[in-house]
Amino acid sequence: MKQRLKKILSVCMVAFCTVSFTAAVSAENKLDETTESILISTAEGLSEAIVTLTDEDIEGYKTSTDDFTVNAMEVWESSKDELGELVEFGETTVEYSGGTYTATVPADFEKRDASFVYIFDEPTAAPTGMSIDIDYPMSVTMKNAAVNTVMGIGTVFVMLIFLSFVIYLMGQTVQKFQKKPEKKSAPALAPAPAVAAAAEEKVDDTELIAVIAAAIAAAEETTPEGFVVRSVRKVNRRKW
């Protein structure tokens, strides 16, 4: 199967290169009958080879270094289960636009109809891309559209909720920085303890000392000059 696919590509490219040197293609019309025939044969041959590939063949081709081969295998692998077994191919059409050829191969499958679409480069007619357009019924199309709409609206609402939460956090942060710190009242000073005896009122005891000294002198029958009274202290007497 691998050799068959490679042979189809090689033969078609050689044929196209040969024709491109011998056919007169006008500047206004890039798609002459010979070119169209070669492209149709290439597209149909590729489609017939691809639909017969097994899972092992697909995995083997996916390791190829050719970008087109890898792309074709990935596209077919993602679509084959949804299409089912091939019923028949339809009539292939070729179009030219913007320096590329587009070949469309319609096909009927057991589950759904589809079209193999190939893109060919203008100078070499080498296939550069492939896609499979599956024909979905209107019910499936509407269902997919509804699902996409719901997902889109849901995504918008989720983003709005997230943005609202971010704005709320930013507002809280700004308010926190703008809020002035409250002035703390100075702790009340404890009342100064009453000064014990508040330095014990200094009373001028000069006169009292003089009187006591005179009394002592009289009792001792002497003069006050004979002794000196240095302190006066109250003596507690026991009460009997």
Image: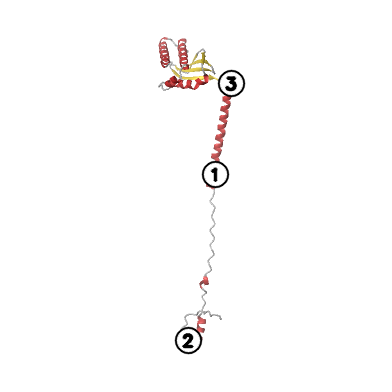
Between 80 and 89, the one lying in front of the other is 80
Percent x, y for residue 202? 51, 75
**Nearer to us: label 3 or label 1:** 3
Which residue is label 2 attached to?
224
Which residue is label 3 attached to?
138
**Nearer to us: label 3 or label 2:** 3
Q: Would you place residue 65 above or below residue 189 in this image?
A: above
Q: Hey, which quadrant is residue 35 in on the image? A: top left
Cα–Cα gap, marks 3 and 1: 51 Å
Which residue is label 1 attached to?
172
Cα–Cα gap, marks 3 and 2: 141 Å
> Do the residues bearing badges 3 and 1 touch, measured as CB atoms within 8 Å?
no
Q: Quadrant of the image for the C terminus?
A: bottom right
Which residue is depicted at the point 49% across and 86% down? 216
What's under tag 2, amino acid-wise? Pro
Between 58 and 169, the one lying in front of the other is 58
What's under tag 1, amino acid-wise? Gln
Q: Hey, which quadrant is residue 145 in on the image? A: top right
Q: Is residue 168 visible?
A: yes
> Which disc is residue 22 wearing?
none
Q: Would you place residue 112 above or below residue 179 in this image?
A: above
Percent x, y for residue 130? 47, 19
Percent x, y for residue 196? 52, 71
Q: How is the image coloured?
A: secondary structure
Q: Would you place residue 105 above or below residue 174 in this image?
A: above
What's under tag 3, amino acid-wise? Met
Element type at mark 3: helix
Between 203 and 27, the one lying in front of the other is 203
